[in-house]
Amino acid sequence: RRFESSRAHQITIIDWIIEMQEKLIAKKIKKSATLMFAFLFCSSGWSMPSEFQAIYNAQLKQVDGQVMMTLKKEQDNLYSYEIITRPSGFWRIIIDGSIWEKSTFNLENGVVRSKTYELKDTIRSKPRQSSATFDWDNLLLSGYYKDRKFELPLNRDVIDRVVLQIAIIHNNQQGINSTEHYILDRDKVKRVQINKKKSVNIRVPFGQFEAIEIEHVSEGSDSINSLWLAPELGYIPVKLTQKKDGKTIFSASLSQLTH
């Protein structure tokens, strides 16, 4: 019996060692994949990253949701960036619809330039749509927001709200300390103040990362938007928040990443 007890104890220890080794191997594989992704993202200067899809667990006030961001290369020097926000879990039964935004853009002399922007919001009680075209040859920005058409001069490097995220990633990847951008907000052009804050260690469902906090605020707005960029992931955001009157009204944490 003593022999059997000792043998059983040895087997338990061996099982524990094997389990720890498997966890260590899995961790190393994930780390290697992460480093490979960062290499693909940052190599060749800023030639744009490989295509990727990032999924975030989100919360808007008390509602659980999901945010999916997808970057695709459409053709030479033309890319699309799509963001879909929708309720998840139990809330899908109560709240129907989603917020869909998609932009196309390219890179001109190291500057990210919007080409088109589209919005379809079916979550609200009154759905809204928007579309915009950035005509850089004729320096004209035209489109509509809801039932309002607009035509605006392109007299500065104006981008849309979706491409703003790409521009912030680009500036940090290149070490450019940009303090402002001009974006199309509905049917007006607004100045956005950018504030780069300190790096912090942050844990999200996808893992733990050292991340740089970037804060941006649109003129005339009392909302503060923040995103935490992880250099290890090629500066893809691992967390996003929006605060109003000191309270967090929206947050999203990275849970999945494929490329």
Image: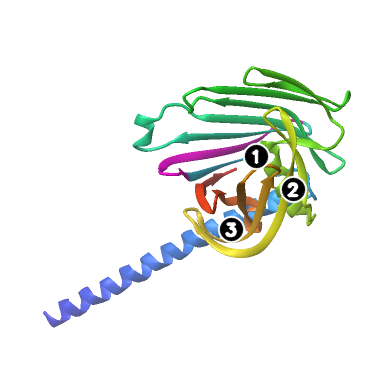
Q: Judge the density around disc 1: few (<14), some (14-19), many (≥20) Cα neighbours within 10 Å.
A: some
* Mark 3 vs 1: CB contact within 8 A: no
Tell me the chief SS of the magenta region: strand
The percent position of residue 186, horizontal first and vertical second, equals: 67, 29
The percent position of residue 111, horizontal first and vertical second, equals: 82, 42
What quarter of the picture does the N terminus occupy? bottom left
Report helix, strand or loop for mark 1: loop
Q: Earlier in the sequence, mark 3 or mark 1?
A: 3
Q: Which residue is mark 1?
A: 51
Q: Residue furthest bottom?
A: 2
Instruction: Tell me the kind of residue under disc 1.
Output: Glu
Q: In terms of image quadrants, where is residue 159? A: top right
Q: Residue 32's mark?
A: 3
Q: In terms of image quadrants, where is residue 117? A: top right
Report helix, strand or loop for mark 3: helix
Q: Which residue is mark 2?
A: 170
- Regarding residue 66, the answer to whether it shows in the image is yes
The percent position of residue 213, horizontal first and vertical second, equals: 63, 57
